[in-house]
Amino acid sequence: MKASEIRKMSAAELDAKLLELKDELFKLRFQQAINQLDNPMRISAVKKDIARVLTVRRDAELHGKDA
């Protein structure tokens, strides 16, 4: 997911996306623990998406939604 796509989301959508990504990360880690993970690179991609969402949320908090 690109940062430009994330910036277009509302605050409620960002919160929902964050919960979805954290849930996906939990499931991926669980699959990794029981050796059923097909694509280990997906974990790092989800972690980066979580960081992007948190960054956009913080930016909106500091500068308002217009920035």
Image (spheres, grey):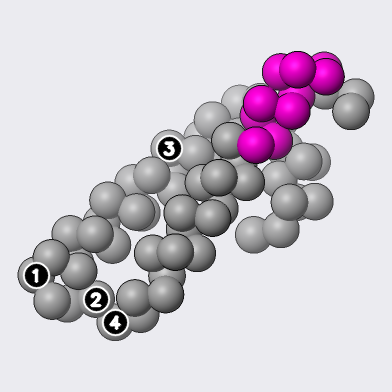
Amino acid type, callout 2: Leu
Question: Residue 62 colored magenta?
Answer: yes
Q: Which residue is mark 1?
A: 34
Q: Which residue is mark 4?
A: 38
Q: Is residue 40 above or below residue 23?
A: below
Residue at left 75%, top 24%?
Answer: 60
Residue at left 43%, top 37%?
Answer: 19
Amino acid type, callout 3: Leu
Magenta stretch secondary structure, dominant:
helix
Query: What is the distance, in whole Å, between disc 4 and disc 2 at their CAs?
Result: 4 Å
- Residue 18 is marked as none
Find the magenta span and give its range: 55-64
Q: Which badge, 2 or 3, is on the more N-terminal residue?
A: 3
Q: Which residue is mark 3?
A: 19
Q: Which residue is mark 2?
A: 37
Q: Would you say residue 64 is visible in this rendering?
A: yes
